[in-house]
Amino acid sequence: MFKQRKNKTFNYQSRFSKDNDVDLEVSNQKEFASKWKQGSKRKMGSAMTMRTLIFILVLLLICMYLLEKKYM
């Protein structure tokens, strides 16, 4: 009468399985190295951006001070 849903199936492979331990270790090391490189690039970019923003803020404060002195 009504169509019943089929159970979902997943291709799950346990994280700590005994199969392919050597392959997993090598792939994990490669993944770690690539994530480390990507993370360090992001941090440097954000540090440069923060440094630039602080520099612009200081320049803006100096300009505001000079303009206030000039017109008062």
Image (tube, rainbow, N blue to C red):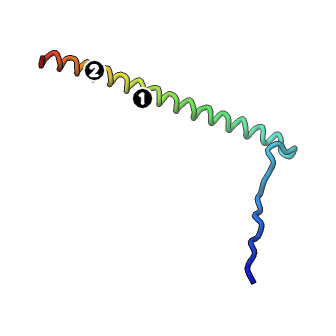
Looking at marks 1 and 2 on the same chain, the residue that comes earlier in the sequence is marked by 1
Name the mark on residue 71. none
Can you name the residue that lies furthest to the bottom here? 1
Q: Which residue is located at x 47 percent, y 30 percent? A: 46
The amino acid type found where label 1 is placed reads Thr
**Residue 56 placement (x, y as % from top left):** 32, 25
Q: Is residue 10 left or right of residue 50?
A: right
Q: Is residue 55 left or right of residue 26?
A: left
Separation of residues labelled 1 and 2 (CA atoms): 18 Å
Quadrant (top left/top right/bottom left/bottom right) for the C terminus: top left
Q: Is residue 45 left or right of residue 35?
A: left
**Residue 51 placement (x, y as % from top left):** 41, 23
How many residues crowd around disc 1 within 10 Å: few (fewer than 14), some, or many (20 or more)?
Answer: few
The amino acid type found where label 2 is placed reads Leu
Name the mark on residue 49. 1
Quadrant (top left/top right/bottom left/bottom right) for the N terminus: bottom right
> Is 49 located above or below residue 22 in the figure?
above
Q: Which residue is located at x 56 percent, y 29 percent? A: 40
> Is 10 located above or below residue 47 in the figure?
below
Residue where numbered disc 2 is placed = 61
